[in-house]
Image: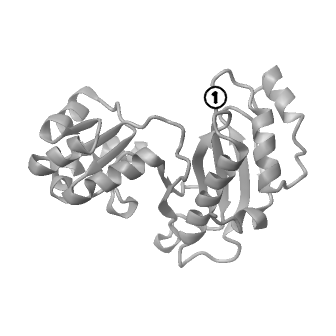
Amino acid sequence: MPKRGKKYRAALAKIDRMKNYTPEEAVKLLKEVAYTEFDPTAEVHLRLGVDPRHADQQVRGVVVLPHGTGKQVKILVFAEGEDARIAEEAGADYVGGDDIIQKIQKEGWLDFDVALATPQMMGKVARLGRILGPRGLMPNPKAGTVVKGEDLPRAIEEIRKGRVEFRVDRTGNLHIPFGKVRAFSEQQLLDNLAAVMDAVVRAKPSGAKGAYIRRVVLAPTMGPGIRVDTRLAEAMRPE
């Protein structure tokens, strides 16, 4: 295990590693243990009782954070013709078809955070699967990122407001950002966390057996984790 720096060790000393904190206590402590010069992202890490190797135990969904993510998001829309015009008017940062696809393939261009595509474009966009897929940027109907032209303004607005996609990894864990530690108030972080937990509970797959949410940990970017009482976290609901 790598040796931790002095600031990390000082932050870790503020946390009782044997305690499962309430969501309110954990969020308050989250602000206290953030030590980076930049405003770190507040992250929630969940250990789930699922085996992602089975199709009926996949966990995937989206959540619109009530107070946003605190991050400026660059949106790419794969669209042509009238759909491209709609996307541009709705405020997408980049809009294109074959030109954008070739730029990604030949130049490795990936200067965007979210990619949307119209159904008509998916046949072409599919060629980018090996590039976009591992980075979580591939448009997918299940994630709500394959959108009809008339629905592009709504989808773009949701992303601007704080739409976050989540998907279980190979080890059965979820890692979801829910705001900025310093820029957001404790209540704003709690509201966003409640929205995340509600979305994760609603995304429980039919094949999940036993305890679904087994561990909940909050952490700032580069900071130590704070364990949260699983029952209290799972019971959180947006106001």
The picture places residue 81, in percent across and down from the top left corner, at 9, 47
The picture places residue 43, in percent across and down from the top left corner, at 64, 44
Q: Quadrant of the N terminus?
A: top right
Q: Quadrant of residue 48?
A: bottom right
**Residue picked out by circle 1:** 39
- Judge whether 37 appears above or below 51 on screen: above
- Judged from the image, the secondary structure of the residue bearing numbered disc 1 is loop
Q: Residue furthest left?
A: 81
The picture places residue 109, in percent across and down from the top left corner, at 29, 29
Q: Quadrant of the C terminus?
A: bottom right
Identify the residue at horizontal 50%, vertical 66% (top origin): 58
- Judge whether 99 appears above or below 214 on screen: above
The picture places residue 218, in percent across and down from the top left corner, at 71, 47
Describe the colour scheme in one phrase. Answer: one colour
Name the kind of residue labelled 1 in the image: Asp
Identify the residue at horizontal 54%, vertical 58% (top origin): 168
- Judge whether 37 appears above or below 175 on screen: above
Q: Quadrant of residue 7?
A: top right
Q: In this view, does 82 lie to the left or right of 56?
A: left
Q: Is residue 62 left or right of residue 107?
A: right
* Residue 148 in view of the camera: no
